[in-house]
Image (cartoon, rainbow, N blue to C red):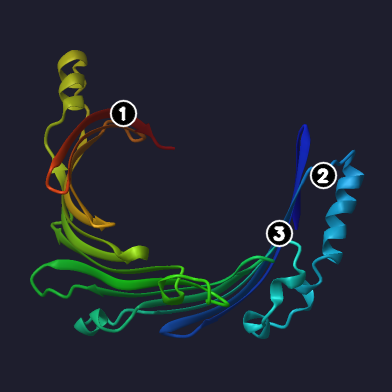
Amino acid sequence: MSAADTTINNSLFTDSEQLGLELPFTFDNYALGFGISRHASTKQDNFEILDYAEGSGKLFNCQNERLYFYRSIPFYEFFEGGKGDNLPGLYNSTYDFSYKRKLFYRNIDIIIPSNVTFSAARDTTKKTDIYQLKNSIEFRGINLNPFIEDETYWGISSLLKFPYANSDSKHNGLLAYNFKIFQTTFLYFNNTSVISFGNEAQLQTDLIWDITANASYSRNGNHSLSQAILTGLFNYENNFYITRKDSLSYTILSSYNIIHQKIDYKHSTETKILKNFATTSLINTIFTITDSEKLTAFLSVTIGGKMEF
């Protein structure tokens, strides 16, 4: 339970409280989780609070105006009609479910989900009453290729928003939606080089869609600008640990009948000089095309350092 009072000529008084319950169940090869949470908040403009005692009194008075937060019956209140008629502010109830399992380290891993989540939420005020459903299903396979060490992820996710009473809504009852499918694969070579490639497709509200393909190559390096400067100017001959990464992505997006395309290339270098210090550099080039007419090019060069303790 919390509250805040901000005074600039007029006062804005806000308060919120939250209750939650999580029930985890762990077995030999998998785990299940279930959670219930409630959140309520109110906001009041032009409210003058003279001292902390008065502010505390106002905070506790809010509890008397929010008895529904404590008295509502779990699950039943998620479908109850007319819930917002007597609410002073926002009321949210959320129900979560999760499932995780251990990997079999066989090809069957790529078709049996390793991680599943689902949540159902309801946001209610006097003027709005919105449901939100979210779910994700993920798959993970390791060493599917007998000739090289590899790791593959892929999954799907979705989000739906719709009103409790949808007579005035658009999209045939849907206020918002999002569907996504993705895939990423990593190939490991001699513990020093990694190649990754992936794809992602997404469909959003108002039939906005985008597709992205990407690839990257990470490996150890033999030379870098930092190494040349330290060796040439300061005769610094300590061991350098240099890593390089090149990445390339292509995205095509359709938004309200306008096609956008983007090509993004990055080259980064990290030179570890001491145990806790490294220099970094990044070259980033981006090309964007809109409706095959307008071409925009962007180039940036960044040099920096980082220190770890």
Q: Nearer the viewer, mark 1 or mark 2?
A: 2
Instruction: Mark 1: give few (<14), some (14-19) or many (20+) Cα within 10 Å.
Output: few
Can you identify the residue that label 2 sits on? 47
Q: Nearer the viewer, mark 2 or mark 3?
A: 2
The answer to which of 216 and 137 lies nearer the viewer is: 137
Nearest to N terminus: mark 2 or mark 3: 3
Residue drawn at (16%, 49%) of the image:
291
Amino acid on which disc 3 is placed: Ser
Whole-percent x and y of residue 50? Answer: 90, 38
Residue drawn at (24%, 57%) of the image:
257
Q: Which mark is residue 304?
A: 1
Badge 2 marks a residue whose secondary structure is loop
Distance from disc 1 to disc 2, alpha carbons, whole Å, reads 49 Å
Residue drawn at (16%, 67%) of the image:
149
Badge 3 marks a residue whose secondary structure is strand
Badge 1 marks a residue whose secondary structure is strand
Asked which quadrant contains residue 213, the reply is bottom left
Amino acid on which disc 2 is placed: Phe
Can you identify the residue that label 3 sits on? 41
